[in-house]
Amino acid sequence: MKKFGYLMGAALLTLGSCTNEINEEGFVDKANTISFNAYSNKTRTESYSSGDVDISVMKTGSFGVVGYKNSDNNLYLGSTTKATEQVWNEKKNAWDYKNEKDKKYWPSGSMDFFAYFPYSDGGATFATTKTDAAPVMTIKSDNANQDVLFSYIKDRTQTDLVHLYFYHALSKIKSVEIQVAAPDIEVSVSNIEILNSYTKGNIKVDNTGVATYSNGTIPRSVGFSTAKKINSQTAEKDRVLFDNDENAYLFATNTTEHDKVKGTGQTMWNGTKDALNGGKLSESKFICMKLTGKVKLHHTDTDTDEYLVGSASDDGEMYIPLRGNSANSADISEFLAGRRYIYKIVMSSNVGYKDNGDPIMLSYIKFGVNQVYGWSDVIVTINL
C-alpha cells in the first residue's frame, strides 16, 4: 500500500508539472501543444497604447498569431477573422495563450506562422488558404501613434517553442533639431507637417513574409511640438528640438535592409526647383517637410526688423527637403521601415524654400576681386 502511494504521488507530481491543457484522451500533454517565444528586432501591466516597441513593451500588451499546415496550406491555428492571442505570463515567465480554447496540438508535417503586434480583435484578417495570389495576413494600422510589428516563421515542425522574430512595419521621424547659423536671424516655428507621407492604412504580409502597404491616408499634421523660437545667438546646447514620440510612425518609401517591407513608391523631394517642373511643393506628390512660422532678420545698422517668412502678425511657410547625409550610413533618399530618423537642420545660407522651390536666402550678395587681367599689346604694322 505504501509503495502504491509513492507511485501515485510521483504520477501526480509529474501531472502537476505539466500545463493544464488536456488532450482528447483526457491526459495532460504539454509537449504536443504549440507554444511561442517572441523577439523584437531590438511583468504584465496595463495594455500597450503607443510608443516604440521592444521586448519589454511587448510584454505589456499581447500579440496575435496564426498558423498554416504546409501539407495543404490551410489555416490551422486561429481563424480568418481572429488570431490566437498570446500574453506574457509572469508566473510562468513565458508567453501563453490568453484563451485556453485557442490551443492547438502539433499536426504531422511542418507549419508556417504569421504574427503581429499590437493585438486587436478587429485588427487583422487572415486567408483561409496560404497562396501566392493574395496576402496571408492583413493588419489594420489606424493609429499613427502605434508601432506595428510583424513576424513570419516558415517550416516549423514540433518543438517546445516556436521562436518568433518581429520586424517594424513602419519608419519613424523621431525628432527635428533646428539650428540657425546665420547672424541676426530669429526663426519661430509653430507647426511641422510631413507632406505626402502616410501614417494610416493596411499592412499586408504575403506567403513569403514580405509586407506591403495599401489604403494609405495622407495626414495634415504629424504632431510635433509647437511654438518654439531659435536665433543665431542660441548656444549649441540650446538648439531647438522638436520631439515627435507620440505621433511619428510613417509608411516606408522603400524596402528595408532585411527586404521585409516594400515601400509606398513615394519620392522624397531632392531640394531642386527643376524637380517641380514649374509646379508647387504644396500641390506636388513629393515627400518633404513644411514649417509654419516666421523668419525675422534684424538690421543692426538701422535697428529695424525685416520678415523673410511671415509677418509680425501672421505665419508663413517654408519647405525643407528631407534628403541629406547620415552620420552613420549612406545618403538618405528613402524612409526605410525599422529606422528612426533624427533630423538636424542647420540654417546658414537659407531657411528653406518657397512653395515654388526658390530658396529663402539668408546671405547677402557679396563680391570679391580675384584678378585684373593685364593689357595685351597688339602691334599693328601698316605698309603703304
Image: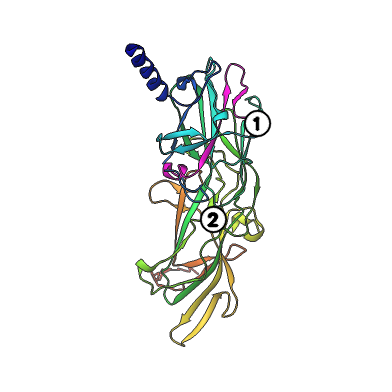
For this view, does 319 lie left or right of residue 133? left
The answer to whether 17 is drawn above or below residue 354 in the figure is above
- Residue with the mark numbered 1: 80
Query: Which kind of residue does numbered mark 2 sit on?
Result: Asn
Residue at 38 percent across and 75 percent down: it is 233
Kind of residue sitting beneath label 1:
Thr
Residue 147: % across, % down = 52, 46
Q: Position of residue 34 (x, y in %)?
A: 50, 25
For disc 1, the neighbor class at 10 Å (few under 14, some 14 to 19, many from 20) is some
| Figure quadrant of residue 80 | top right
Circle on res. 125 = none
Report the magenta residues as a range: 54-79
| In the foreground, 351 or 91 | 91
Residue sticking out furthest to the bottom: 302
Which of 14/170 is in front?
A: 14
On screen, residue 327 versus residue 365, left or right, reads left
Q: Position of residue 175 (x, y in %)?
A: 46, 58
- Residue 172 can be seen in this image: yes
The residue depicted at 46 percent of the width and 67 percent of the height is 349
Q: Is residue 279 visible?
A: no
Q: Nearer the viewer, residue 354 or 197?
A: 197
Provide the residue designation for mark 2: 247
| Magenta stretch holds residue 47 | no
Which residue is nearer to you in this view: 359 or 36? 36
| Label 1, label 2: how far apart the Cα atoms are | 30 Å
In the image, residue 57 lies in the stretch drawn in magenta: yes
Q: Dot 2 surroundings within 10 Å: few (below 14), some, or many (20 or more)?
A: many
Question: Which comes before the other along the chain, label 1 or label 2?
Answer: 1
Name above or below for residue 95 compared with residue 357.
above
